[in-house]
Amino acid sequence: MISPQDLDPLSGTAPARATVAPLDLDLIRRYAGPAPRYTSYPPATQFHADLAALDLNARLAEDNTLEAGPISLYVHLPFCESLCWYCGCNTVITRRQGSADDYLDLLTRELDLTVARMRPGRSVVQLHLGGGTPTFLTPEQLRRLTRLLRERFVFAKDAEISVEVDPRRLRQEHVAALREMGLNRASLGVQDTDAAVQRAINRLQPHAQNHQAVDWLRAAGVTSINLDLIHGLPLQTTETFARTLDDVLALAPERLSVFSYAHVPWMKPAQRIFEQRAQLPEPEDKLAMFALAHERLTAAGYLDVGLDHFARPDDELAVALHDGTLHRNFQGYTTRAGASLYGFGVSSISQTPNSYRQNHKTLGAWRDALDGGQLPVERGLWLTPEDQRRRELVMDIMCRRRLDFAALDRRLGVAVTERYAAELASLADLEADGIVERDASGIRVTPRGAPLLRVVASRFDPTFQAAARRHAQAV
Ligand code: SF4
């Protein structure tokens, strides 16, 4: 087994140098500021709604040439019984179980419309059920979803099948139905185990429910469990968050995600209540919580995979980081991205080698499109060859933390140091601050610079740089 002290994800080999650098908070403060998370490049903010220009049928046909490789599937299941006030997801709050039956009817139409445009037999290497709350569906509804998918797609024997689990809405019967689907990974929303914080966010979840969910999943043979935490929630302090970290570490998950709470009340009005009650921690306290999480999780043996993801050194995600095979898509870091990602359901995003397309974000618009026999796409983007080259650069930084000039010259068919001379020159301040190192063969993000991956990647993103310049001029 590789230990975190042995592992240098930057080199692609197992070197002697340790990579578990403590966070440099001054450096993070200096470069703090909005930057895309690069779950895609170009980021979803660049998608447009000109469907004629998107020419969906051509995109799908192109993606299904004889050479088309394996695919990933994502199914968005938007229903939740109650709203967590911090939530930034696309949700439909209801207690009407029949809503899920109606949704599955529509999903069947979307599957049929899409599959009719696909080359048969492409192997599914990854399926992710997200939400919302996938286990809002009853076990019988989950079995129906399994049939809908298995009747239309060929799954690889070792396909990764994962689900987002809300421990408050999980019964043992759900676990049985998900295992029949082939479930082998689960991601549990914990967020925080402190009762006062839970009351403040309208999400009461006794830790016993987390224990129970983990026990059921492990007993059913689920081999990889991720726990999601959020830092920066109302009433959180470093003391309460330290107890939450103790609680989740006791469950020994293979992976942990420590997300930063995104306060966007103009988009998510329920978040206003935190301002009205003056409950949000100060930015400095929020940063201290992340520093605490980083210190505790790496001390407990987890590897910092990137941004907010941590994994045990023997977990596939950590091994992929080490091997240089890590990928990034709309679900975050992943190991087995297919050549294309097909998303189904409200607001889901699909990706082919040269296009993105996102479904309508409201249930009504999604349903109307399907009722009219149309693919329910609201917006998207067709990538130019230049976008595709920049995507390689951005994803190499986000996933491999390096740019290897010779390898990139071969892959992209251009002389990278010449074509991107201005972008590489723009790294000078990052180099001076020890965030990146550069020599004739390439650049690498240092362990000290790892929390700033997004900043490094953004230097290769002209749309972000243009927006940052406009913003700087405005202030
Ligand atoms: S359960 Fe998840 S998706 Fe549903 S409201 Fe809460 S945070 Fe949002």
Image: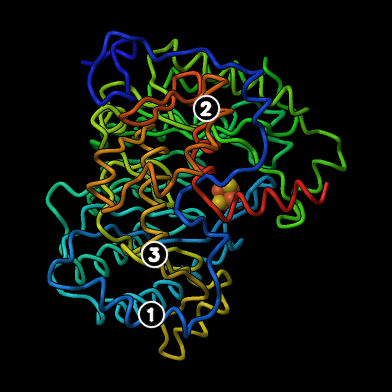
Decide: few, some or many residues near mark 1? Use Cα within 10 Å; few <14, some 14-19, many ≥20: some
Disc 2 crowd rating (10 Å Cα; few below 14, some 14-19, many 20+) is: many
Please say if 10 is above or below 263: above
Residue bearing mark 3: 350
Amino acid beneath label 1: Leu
Answer whether residue 141 is visible to the viewer in this image: no
> How far across and how far down the image is residue 206, in percent?
57, 31
x%, y% of residue 75? 38, 61
Q: Which residue is mark 2?
A: 451
How many numbered discs sit on the rendered protein? 3
- Residue 172 spot, x, y in % from top left: 35, 43
Question: Is 276 left, or right, of 458 in this rendering?
Answer: right
What percent of the width, then of the height, locates residue 191? Answer: 57, 34
Comparing 60 with 381, the one in front is: 381
Q: Residue at x 69, y 34 (%)?
A: 233
The foreground one among 21 and 141 is: 21
Q: Is residue 127 toward the left or the right of residue 384 in the image?
A: left
